[in-house]
């Protein structure tokens, strides 16, 4: 299932099978879901309407917090400093883990602020005498299974208290990299239950030794965690307090937090463990030949209907545009089937163009004014003239340009000396405005923004196309190049449904054309139905 990243040089002693097995037990950030909308609906995500529009930027709500604002990362900075606690939390039952954490907090309370480590982090433990650190950690060192789990810490030299762990636990083994990876992966999400429990330990310990003064009700919530108060409010309070402890320079400097070079830790993990990628790619299976034949037949039907509805050989902007845009979209849809482009970035280029075809035709249909139809046509003629003149003035003619064709299109309706070149949109509206005015902004929102990212080579599209997520938590699920991706989610069904809506518009303008693409509906009917729970 997993393999090392091709071409990546590594110096390590990691059992790949053991790490892969550990990762298989995790629900890491890349886990899939049968119902992604319900999955993300559970998250506390601000809606688009909660963003403020400033010029051409939708400003994120948290950016409203007045400066200076210092961002602090749980996974990058603070999780590595609590790695010992993460190992315990990830590998043992929660009740036992919380009891062990309470015992450690009680030891800190008994030692008092003057003797106890200022925090329960690796950097703070490394700043106190060995005897004190060993005393505080004694609850997790008393049993053999927890000591065996914690020996994974000896794999790392970057820990500020590494010299203490050499005395506290036995020599690590090769499989301990998997133990370490599972712990980091299980607590990678800063809002997960395991991460919250470890962050609770950090807060509870600081309260116990008197590093913080908080209201009595909060002390009670922390002391009786997780059995007191509404956890929907308590857990966020724990996380917010832990962030404040690690996010204030004066506080963290005083407690030794900044003595841990977390980037050195991550570099050590990168150098000693391999990248892991999944070799499995789930892709839809299509009867491509049958779909191609069906779309070709509909193309022919539309072309025949064009002939049957032709009433003049003069310029008929409405008739030509309505059929031309529909046939163009069908042609693009056929292009998706060529070399299975629907699985690659080209499929997104084509879907974007089909969405633009639909919005343009729907806008023209809703307005249905001779002037608007003519504006659409004249705009295209002017574009041909512009391309023709630029080609003539350029030093080198692009290989794909045919000058005779450009000249024909620029002069087809009128001599080009009478043809204006409109540099804005043909309707003096951008595509979003056209979609809004014609009541089809749902199409724009669903299909245009994300597909445009691929057309414009935006970072998000580049990342989706040529990079894959390394599944090694010790690499922070970073990005590594992969071979050309031929298994993207298909664009075929979306394109077919869009074109059917275009055919509805065409039928409204020039009845009656009943042909519709139906392969995706038949494929849906053949899928096995899930039984209701």
Image (cartoon, rainbow, N blue to C red):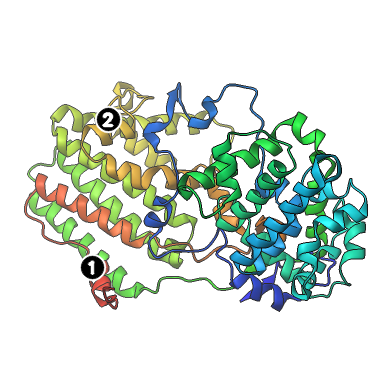
Mark 1–mark 2 distance (CA, rounded to whole Å):
38 Å
Residue 475: tell me if it is visible. Answer: yes
Residue drawn where x is 50% and y is 66% of the image = 487
Query: Which SS class for mark 1?
Result: helix
Quadrant holding the N terminus? bottom right
Query: Which SS class for mark 2?
Result: helix
Q: Position of residue 205 (x, y in %)?
A: 71, 47
Of residues 490 and 417, the one nearer the viewer is 490
Q: Position of residue 114 (x, y in %)?
A: 85, 39
Quadrant holding the C terminus? bottom left
Q: Position of residue 257 (x, y in %)?
A: 79, 41
**Location of mark 2 (residue):** 378
Residue drawn where x is 13% and y is 34% of the image = 368
Q: Which mark is residue 521?
A: 1
- The answer to whether mark 1 and mark 2 are in CB contact below 8 A is no
- Write down the quadrant of residue 23 in the picture: bottom right
347 relative to 532 in the view: left or right: right
């Amino acid at each position: 299932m997993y393999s090392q990243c091709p071409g990546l040089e590594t110096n390590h002693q990691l059992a790949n099978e053991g790490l892969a097995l550990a990762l298989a037990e995790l629900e890491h950030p890349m886990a899939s879901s049968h119902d992604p909308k319900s999955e993300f609906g559970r998250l506390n995500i601000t809606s688009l309407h909660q963003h403020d529009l400033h010029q051409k930027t939708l400003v994120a709500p948290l950016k409203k917090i007045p400066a200076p604002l210092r961002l602090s990362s749980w996974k990058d900075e603070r999780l590595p400093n609590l790695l010992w606690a993460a190992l315990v939390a990830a590998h043992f039952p929660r009740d036992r883990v919380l009891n062990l954490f309470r015992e450690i907090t009680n030891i800190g309370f008994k030692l008092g602020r003057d003797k106890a480590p200022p925090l329960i982090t690796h950097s703070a433990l490394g700043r106190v005498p060995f005897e004190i650190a060993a005393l505080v950690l004694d609850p997790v060192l008393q049993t053999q299974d927890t000591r065996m789990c914690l020996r994974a810490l000896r794999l790392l030299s970057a820990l500020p208290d590494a010299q203490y762990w050499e005395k506290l636990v036995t020599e690590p083994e090769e499989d301990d990299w998997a133990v370490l990876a599972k712990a980091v992966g299980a607590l990678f999400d800063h809002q997960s239950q395991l991460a919250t429990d470890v962050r609770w330990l950090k807060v509870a310990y600081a309260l116990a030794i008197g590093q913080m003064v908080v209201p009595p009700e909060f002390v009670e919530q922390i002391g009786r965690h997780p059995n007191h108060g509404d956890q929907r409010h308590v857990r966020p309070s724990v996380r917010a307090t832990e962030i404040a402890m690690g996010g204030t320079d004066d506080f963290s400097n005083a407690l030794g937090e900044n003595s841990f070079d977390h980037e050195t830790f991550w570099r050590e993990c990168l150098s000693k463990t391999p990248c892991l990628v999944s070799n499995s790619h789930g892709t839809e299976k299509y009867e491509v030949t049958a779909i191609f034949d069906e779309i070709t037949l509909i193309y022919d039907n539309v072309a025949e209907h064009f002939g049957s509805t032709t009433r003049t050989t003069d310029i008929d902007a409405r008739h030509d545009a309505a059929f031309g845009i529909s046939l163009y979209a069908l042609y693009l849809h056929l292009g998706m089937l060529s070399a299975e482009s629907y699985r690659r970035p080209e499929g997104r280029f084509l879907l974007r163009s089909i969405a633009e075809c639909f919005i343009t035709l729907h806008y023209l249909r809703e307005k249905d004014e001779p002037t608007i139809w003519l504006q659409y046509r004249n705009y295209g003629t002017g574009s041909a003239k512009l391309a023709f003149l630029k080609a003539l003035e350029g030093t080198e003619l692009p290989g794909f340009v045919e000058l005779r064709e450009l000249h024909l299109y620029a002069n087809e309706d009128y001599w080009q000396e009478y043809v204006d070149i409109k540099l804005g949109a043909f309707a003096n509206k951008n595509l979003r405005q056209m979609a809004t005015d014609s009541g089809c902004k749902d199409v724009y929102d669903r299909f245009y923004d994300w597909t445009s990212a691929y057309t414009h080579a935006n970072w998000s599209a580049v990342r989706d196309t040529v990079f894959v997520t390394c599944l090694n938590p010790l690499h922070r699920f970073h990005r590594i190049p992969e071979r050309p991706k031929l298994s993207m989610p298909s664009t075929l069904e979306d394109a077919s449904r869009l074109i059917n809506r275009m055919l509805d518009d065409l039928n409204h303008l020039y009845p009656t054309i009943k042909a519709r693409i139906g392969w995706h509906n038949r494929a849906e009917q053949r899928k096995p139905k899930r039984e209701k729970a």
